[in-house]
Amino acid sequence: MANLLNVQSLRPISVSIPTVSSKLELSDLLGALKVRFGIGRNNYTITSGLYKVGKPDSQSDVLVSANYKLSFDVLRKNLDSLNVWILVIDTKGVNVWCAAGKGNFGTDNVVKSIKNTSLEHIVKHRNIILPQLSASGVAAYKVKEQTGFRAMFGPVQAKDIKAFIEAGHKATPAMRKVTFPMKERAKLISVDFMNAKYKLLLAMFAFFIFSGLDRTGFLFMKMFSTSLFPLINIFGGYVAGIVIATLFLPWIPFRAFALKGAFWGLILTVLLYSLIEVSYLEGISMGLINISIASFMTMNFTGSSTYTSLSGVQKEMKWAVPFQIGFIALGTILFIISKLV
């Protein structure tokens, strides 16, 4: 009976495997643009399972990807002229690096996907190529023990996958290096900018109202005539923390992201104070608020950066957040006082 079961388990399974193109269509590009602005980002997924690019056979390479469609599309657009299989892991719609950190792109998920797709019946070799950024979540030796498949880690960038395969599955030192150039940082600006848009509008509305305060009461016309400085400062702090600090991240003094943002908040405050005439007290109040906003928004970028670590972020937040809250509170009080004196 045991021999019969072993023989039956080796029979090829008839399955219909979808084919995907290495060329992205307009809908793919529009979808990518949409998620870059944070629209539907949590639901931008592709069904997990096995896919084929070109006409792969039993000897073709098996590449592993997250089911976040942006990650999947970045991979497949770099597979032109190749005949390969793509094994898509259910990472709950999270990209490779973040999913590996959260455990969604982990050993168990890889093993489960290999078994669910009956990969051993589709390819004769026993190798899979995982993205290098999944290494923190996948124990290659456990994948080998549980499935018989050897897990290799490909290059950091999908654009290098063809060269990696052509070199006999060998990566150069450059392929292993994680870089975060200005171009890549710029891609993340739109998401962070839209992420807190309602909080930005609420803060601007609040200070628009506060601008109408007067020692005689509340003056409607004063609200319109004196709100320019606080509104520009709040919006400027937001932009300084998300855009300017992000683009110039490596060249800003200080190691802590909170201080990097505060640096640009201070620069912007001095610039605005020199251009718009307001009282000394109002200038200080908006400076504190501006610095706090820029500091917090830049610190928030640590989740998107390769320049820090989880422990580093936790350590920084313990001292930075109290200061940011204190600056906001003190700045708001001083601003109100500046309108009443």
Image (cartoon, rainbow, N blue to C red):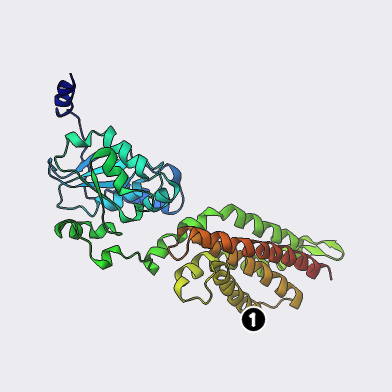
Q: Tell me if 268 is positioned left or right of 17 in this view.
A: right
Task: Tell me the residue at 30%/59% (across/down).
Answer: 156
**Closer to the camera, 51 or 145?**
145
Q: Position of residue 336 (x, y in %)?
A: 78, 65
Residues 28 and 217: in front is 28
- Residue 286 or 303: which is nearer the viewer? 303
The answer, for residue 49, to whether it is visible in the render is no
Work out whether 73 lies above or below 262: above
List the single residue furthest toward the bottom. Answer: 274
Regarding mark 1 in the picture, which secondary structure is present there? helix
Q: Position of residue 170 (x, y in %)?
A: 20, 60
Specify the amino acid type for callout 1. Ser
- Residue at 68% over, 70% down: 288
Question: Which residue is farthest right?
Answer: 216
Q: Quadrant of the N terminus?
A: top left
Residue 118 image offset from top left, x and y in percent: 23, 33
- All told, the count of numbered labels is 1
Q: Quadrant of the C terminus?
A: bottom right
Task: Return the residue at label 1.
Answer: 274
